[in-house]
Amino acid sequence: MSETESPGRLIVGPFNRVEGDLEVQLELGAGQVTSARVNSPLFRGFERILEGRGPLDALVIVPRICGICSVSQSMAAVSALEALAGAAPPPNAVIAREIMRAVENLGDHLTHFHVFFMPDFARAAYAGRPWFPLVEERFKAAAGSAVREAVAARAGLFHVFGIMGGKWPHTLTIQPGGVARALDARDKVRLGAIITAFRHYLERSLFGAPLEAVLALSDLEALDAWRARGPAGNFRLFLEIAHDLGLRGLGRAFDRFLSYGAGPGAGAGTWRDGAGGDLDFGRIAEDHSFARMTGRDRRHHPFDGSTEPDGADEAGYSWCKAPRLGGLPFETGAIARRLVAGDPLVEALALRDGGNVESRVIARLLELAREVERIGSLVRQLEVKGDWHVETRLPDEGRALGVTEAARGALGHWLRVEGGRIAAYQIIAPTTWNFSPRDSDGVPGPLEKALEGTPVADGERVPAAVQHVVRSFDPCMVCTVH
């Protein structure tokens, strides 16, 4: 998984339990990382595949960018197509799509915590810690009791897609103008039962308490009390590990956060130093300076962007571009959503120690609780006798932006149509923001910044702390390189 190029350099990768390929080059000094370069080593080229095709082909192609956030890709694509057509789907369709998007995100958060993140603490290196026997029993990779239970709970939750989407991943139910599957009263009852069952699983296993108690956590004192004497669920176990290992001191980046808004009516915005800000999509640009792409002489707004690979590029070290907002790197994800939404506990965590390993994971777990509550409400709002789709005609010319929030954060599709065909299609995925390379000013991306100062012990070829920082961002590299 790693190799040492020189006494002061360590290459870590490829990472296991990561969607796609990832390699991190670390410069070391005084027992810690002094600088990092994050490499997305596999170019896929979905943006190029889309060029010249009919606009509706995007609904078949973009979900296949990723097998774990395909609904989010569909949502971004259909939003762009509807913006192009000036179409407004009926309320039922808006709610149905949002249920599917949110359920996919719940499954992703659940998988990340149980299958990707927590098994690192079941490694033999932590055998002397007081919490290790419990972690090993619950979270040992592919064998832990909590891992098996989470996989089963996720499978039960995803019956939602069987009812609403016909299948998962790569459903074609989400279409311009609405959804292709109308639900009846029986479907609505079944959806409610699925969400209730998943809620009971979270209350029993993850939190060990009613979700109302989790959602009532609003300050650091309450969180500390939960860690010290709260219910004996896996949430408390993580809090104990984070406190023991000092995870709040690992992985701090720039403390600039970006969200496109989680759900209908949730506004896009930014957060920094306790203050929210508006989001101007016109100030988003991609920098190719250290990406293996042509067009390194300027920053490209996505409507004017390109995806022209340059395999002979000696300056580039990643196939990932460097998105910037107003010339600055931003972090995205559950922590950004909770901050932009004004969650008091996540704000308190960020104001104390910024975005770090502990606060990113807590934000995801809190979002699990909050989203289950919201999905239950959405199901109750469905009007089975109402409309589910309106006829939508796509124009032969135009351009449009479609955005959504995938589990890992802000996802945007920029579409330009000429002569009834896709002339250009640019995608900025959440991990593109978080795992971007340096820009023309030499400023690192969020993960590269977050790795600076991470401790690396002498002779440690697969640094545990480095893995914790990387996984705290929940990387999806296949989306990053499309």
Image (cartoon, helix red, strand yellow):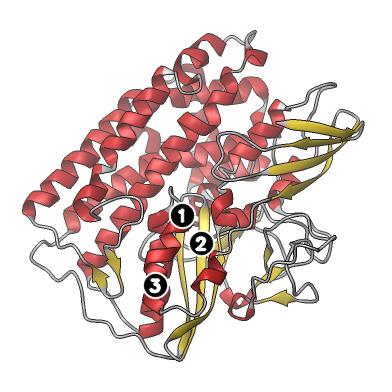
Is residue 114 positioned above or below 109 on the image? Answer: above
Label 3 or label 2, whichever comes before in sequence order: 3
Mark 3 closeness class: few <14, some 14–19, many ≥20 residues within 10 Å: few
- Relative horizontal placement of residue 405, taking residue 443 as reference (left or right): left
Is residue 28 positioned above or below 72 on the image? Answer: above
Q: Nearer the viewer, mark 3 or mark 1?
A: 3
Mark 2 closeness class: few <14, some 14–19, many ≥20 residues within 10 Å: many
What's under tag 1, amino acid-wise?
Ala
Mark 1 closeness class: few <14, some 14–19, many ≥20 residues within 10 Å: many
What's under tag 3, amino acid-wise?
Asp
Q: Nearer the viewer, residue 186 or 45?
A: 45
The kind of secondary structure element at disc 2 is: strand
For residue 406, the mark is 1
Residue at 26% x, 30% y: name it: 200
Which residue is the site of mark 2?
411
Locate residue 112, reporting x and y percent. Answer: 49, 37
Residue 184 seen: yes
Label 1 or label 2, whichever comes before in sequence order: 1
Residue 224 seen: no
Asked where in the image residue 159 lies, by quadrant, the reply is top left
Q: Are marks 1 and 2 in contact (CB under 8 Å)?
A: yes
Residue at 37% x, 65% y: name it: 60
Q: Are marks 3 and 1 in contact (CB under 8 Å)?
A: no
Which residue is the site of mark 3?
57
Q: Nearer the viewer, mark 3 or mark 2?
A: 3
Locate residue 135, reporting x and y percent. Answer: 51, 16
Distance in Å between CA atoms under marks 3 and 2 = 19 Å
Locate residue 33, reporting x and y percent. Answer: 82, 37
What's under tag 2, amino acid-wise?
Leu
The quarter of the rendered structure image containing the N terminus is top right
The kind of secondary structure element at disc 3 is: helix
